[in-house]
Image (cartoon, coloured by chain):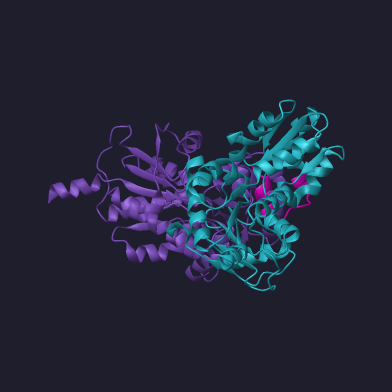
Chain colours: A purple, B cyan
Amino acid sequence: MMKEKNLLCNAPVGVFDSGVGGLTVAREIMRQLPNERIVYFGDTARVPYGSKSRETVTRFSRQIVRFLQLQEVKAIVVACNTASAYALDELEKETDIPIIGVVKPGARAAIDATHNGKIGVIATEATISSGIYKRYIEKTDTGVSVVEKACPLFVPLVEEGLWEDPVTDEIARRYLSGLIDIDIDTLILGCTHYPLIRSTVGKIMGEKVTLVNPAYETARELKGLLEKEGLESEKRPELGTELYRFFVSDAADKFQKFANSILPYGILSAKAVNIEEY
Amino acid sequence: MMKEKNLLCNAPVGVFDSGVGGLTVAREIMRQLPNERIVYFGDTARVPYGSKSRETVTRFSRQIVRFLQLQEVKAIVVACNTASAYALDELEKETDIPIIGVVKPGARAAIDATHNGKIGVIATEATISSGIYKRYIEKTDTGVSVVEKACPLFVPLVEEGLWEDPVTDEIARRYLSGLIDIDIDTLILGCTHYPLIRSTVGKIMGEKVTLVNPAYETARELKGLLEKEGLESEKRPELGTELYRFFVSDAADKFQKFANSILPYGILSAKAVNIEEY
């Protein structure tokens, strides 16, 4: 019995995203929970999710959860705002291990941060049209109002490497001007790519606006959840391929290059799997 | 026997793309071959192809060819440069009906158009890294040299509707400056989205540079092929759902809206299919 428990505690946490963006969440988990093993899956063959429908995003997410369960993960983090918005409720019903998304931790952090009760959310078209941030925040704290704005060009600009660039400034000014006009004091970066252009967004919003990165809060929530369930890993595994494993549905070498530019540890390899078979 | 032949002639032409871009090819077929029925498939669940690997693009294309064959098409047009670049050779081997892509027709038109023997190609990362335009053109006419440039932000800019916009001008200037410096006189728009920003590209390249749209040449080549094989439809079918049918793998309503903005006929509906099952 004791042995079984230890085995389960030493099992990895599954983390998935439509592509590379969720690595910003994996990075926070590595920082805050250094004892935990991670199995990361990036759906690079079907990226992006943010322009696609609820049905499609849910079908894709289900396949990934099946894949991660075959890797014997002890818990799953949906490190993609769009999948959290569209698929998490369904996945929770169907899955017998703990599963958390990035939306609710981000929303709660924004509620804690706001002073004037005006919160902005920027995210993909899909996340915004789900209305999930607005609904959840305004239900949790009726004194708060939320204004949402889809920013579909931010992901391609980040992937093109234009993290600090006059073009990104100009596009950000257009997307954000409406949020500046209504005097929000807190802005949720509601897409895992956006922390990479945090300085551009911060420059345009001004220093009085608090930027909330749900990745940080999600790692904290995972920590609490593992403690509550008695699932924390007790000691740090050796650094090496067994500590962090990376899987993608396409172009493993490209993924590896991107991953190595944002993770604190170099990753040795990413393995390609045909996710449509799961 | 005569009846069988007629049945075959009246069968539709299959046209496919990663998403909406191939509609610029379908539009040319509608204009130049008004007697032909069309079944269009846009892989909107897995779009874009231009940033993905040869293996993935080939697997996706195979599934779509199987789907189109079940629609009993008489010929297939691969209306996507990336799929033409990566998958056409394989598809030709595996398919028992005529199948053509957009790359060779576009390449031949450019060879006809150039006077100084310097041709530029702009396309997605995948099409450029395949090297197919350069290889095919320089083999067909050894007096011609080709310079290629990937323009990954053009597709998102087109999809965001910024067809004429200072941001698109700025990005285009960056992508195209190298081609202007080496004095090309012909430029292939090697991605089916690019004809929609033709005026921006034309303004930056200047009026001495001929822009080649492979869609036009592909429709011409299809016409010749159907004539050669005795497969032309003899009379024009009634306008209606049977003339042009549209299928997508995701978000049929969004597709329909985009289609209606660029096609000469309003489309009544697009039907969603789960392409992973083919």
Left or right of residue B4, residue A3 in this image: left
Magenta range? B151-169
| Front-lying residue, A75 or B116 | B116
Residue A249 in the figure: left or right of residue A95:
right
Q: Is residue B85 left or right of residue B260?
A: left
Residue in the picture at 72% in, 53% down = A174
Q: In this view, does B238 lie above or below A184?
A: below
Question: Quarter of the image holding residue B142?
Answer: top right
- Look at 48% across and 59% down and name the residue there: B275
Residue A167 lies, with reference to residue A212, above or below; the image says above
Q: Residue at horizontal 68%, vertical 46%? A: B154
Q: Is any part of residue B265 visible from this angle?
A: yes
Q: Can residue A122 be seen in this view?
A: no
Q: Where is the C terminus of chain B found, in terms of image quarters?
A: bottom left
Residue A68 location (% of width, % of height): 34, 50
Q: Does residue A231 lie above or below B183 as drawn?
A: below
Residue furthest out toward the right = B207
Give the residue at the far top of this rendering.
B143
User: In the image shown, does B8 or B248 lie closer to the viewer?
Assistant: B8
Q: Is residue B66 magenta?
A: no
In this figure, what is the number of numbered marks? 0
Give the quadrant of residue B104. Answer: top right
Location of residue B266 (image quadrant): bottom right
Which residue is at a point 59% across and 34% down the rendered structure image?
Answer: B129
**Position of residue A249 measured from the top left corner of the image (x, y, whole percent):** 44, 46
| Horizontal and vertical percent position of residue B82 | 59, 44
